[in-house]
Image (cartoon, rainbow, N blue to C red):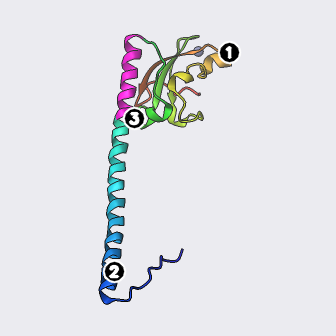
Amino acid sequence: MAPKYHPTPLSGGDRRALSKELGKARAMANILATRSAEMRAKGEALIQQADKLLCESWNERMWSDGEPIDPSPTIDQAVNGGFAWLEIRCEGCRTPGDVDLAAMKNPRATFVHDLASRLRCRKCTTAGRRPSATLLQLAGQPRHSPTKA
Ligand SMILES: [Zn+2]
């Protein structure tokens, strides 16, 4: 794109004033962009804290009562909050497992509780059974051998 054209004023005073205004506007553009970037970084840090708290809250509910599993964080919120692993237990064979949320093919906006019916234990699937999984906790690290989602 060609630079914007400002018609040159006839008087010297007006030319100086225009040049001053243009300089101010250009400096302002940079200041505002920097401020926007700073504000966005602060906002993202706050969102990350909010996501972490949401995961911790869900974990407390799962630990204390184990229900309701809905509402729960989304995959994106869990990963962003530092809880990229979901601990589950197969209802068929009671085998515990960890699901790597970051590696899941589901849309990032999928709620963690919606995964319950979709997660299958490898052992039981091999045996031709499809028991559901109980969701236990969100975690920062896997505790068991990873479960194929
Ligand atoms: Zn199983």
Magenta region = 50-65
Disc 1 element: loop
The residue pinned by badge 3 equals 82
Residue 129 horizontal side relative to residue 11, left or right: right
Between 34 and 2, the one lying in front of the other is 2
The residue pinned by badge 1 equals 127
Amino acid type assigned to the residue bearing label 2 in the image: Ser
Q: Position of residue 41 (x, y in %)?
A: 35, 49
Which of marks 1 and 2 precedes in the sequence?
2
Disc 2 element: helix
Amino acid type assigned to the residue bearing label 1 in the image: Ala
In front: label 2 or label 1: 2
Q: Quadrant of residue 25?
A: bottom left
Report whether the residue tagged 1 is closer than 8 Å to ligand 1.
Answer: yes
In front: label 3 or label 1: 3
Between 58 and 85, the one lying in front of the other is 58
The residue pinned by badge 2 equals 19
How many angstroms separate mark 3 from mark 1 (CA)?
Answer: 34 Å
Q: Residue at x 38, y 14 (%)?
A: 63
Residue 51 sits inside the magenta stretch: yes
How many angstroms separate mark 2 from mark 3 (CA)?
Answer: 50 Å
Look at the picture and state if 116 lies above or below 41: above
Q: Position of residue 38 (x, y in %)?
A: 32, 53
Between 28 and 81, the one lying in front of the other is 28
